[in-house]
Image: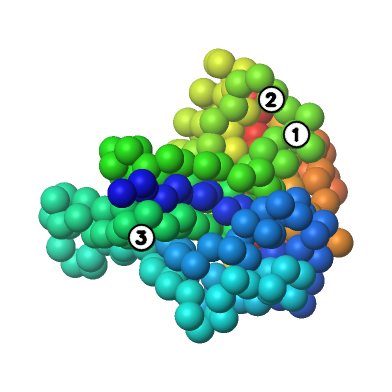
Amino acid sequence: MKKGRLYLVPNTLDFGVEAAAVDLQQVLPMHIIQTAARLEYWAAESAKTTRAFLKRVDALVPLTQPLQNLQITELPRPPKGRMADAAQQNQAWYALLAPALAGHDLGLISEAGLPAVADPGALLVAAAHEADIEVIPLSGPSALLMALSASGLNGQSFAFVGYLPVEAPARAARIRELEALSARQQQTQLMIETPYRNSALLLALLSTLKPHTKLSISCGLSLEQGWTRSATVEQWRSSGESLPDKIPAVFALLG
């Protein structure tokens, strides 16, 4: 039996800010909306938010099947309080590929942006390659790359370092480590934070980084009120600018 394909379906960047939801057609090409409309099997972080996405798709291109008939399976979550059994975890990821192994196309979607980029779906993509299932990435918004391109920092050498430690001493130590690495290699360091901690991360960066280190922040990318500002740490300190704590942001530094 011919295997189905795994489609990496991009999502919008307005997750969690429904009041400012963007027009789907402004951020996703029509052929991607059409692809999403025909897929009957999905792997997702959240079935609820995936249904919300598909409702937006259905308003533009009718779904092949009624929404309640679609199979949306959530990605495995690591068990809490004990070490995960590697074989058991791998089996859980492979189980998500059952529709593709049975000949059906399968969609993988993130909560925001591109699947498998700063996203747990990468494990499903790896499993698909091991199962010899064709992986088809679809073009769409990536907050990380959009922030990098808008920053004016080094786009030839960069690294995404994810979330920083929450505890103040560990966070400060990590910031100093990244600043030294950036200065030594002239490499832009990209990071993100849970939106309600945006202000806390900004404060940590401004109190730890050297005055002439460059800091760029992109907030609410693709949203009507979205913006990017790049300046030295010294200039950020002088401006006294604050960040909204409900809008996703990407932080970048270059030593």
Does the CB distance between marks 1 and 3 fall below 8 Å?
no
Residue 226 placement (x, y as % from top left): 81, 56
The residue mark sitting in front, 2 or 3, is 3
Q: Vertical placement of 6 versus 41: above or below?
A: above
| Residue beneath the point at 49% across and 39% down | 161
Q: Is residue 172 visible?
A: no
Q: Secondary structure at mark 1?
A: helix
Does the CB distance between marks 2 and 3 fall below 8 Å?
no
Nearest to N terminus: mark 2 or mark 1: 1
Task: Describe residue 161's horizontal placement relative to residue 200 as left or right.
Answer: left
Q: Which labelled disc corresponds to residue 149?
A: 1
Q: Which residue is mark 3?
A: 99
Nearest to N terminus: mark 1 or mark 3: 3
Image quarter for residue 59? bottom right
Nearest to N terminus: mark 2 or mark 3: 3
Q: How is the structure coloured here?
A: rainbow
User: Residues under labels 1 and 3: Cα distance?
Assistant: 37 Å
Q: Secondary structure at mark 2?
A: loop
Q: Amino acid at mark 1?
A: Ser
Q: Which labelled disc corresponds to residue 155?
A: 2
Does the CB distance between marks 2 and 1 fall below 8 Å?
yes
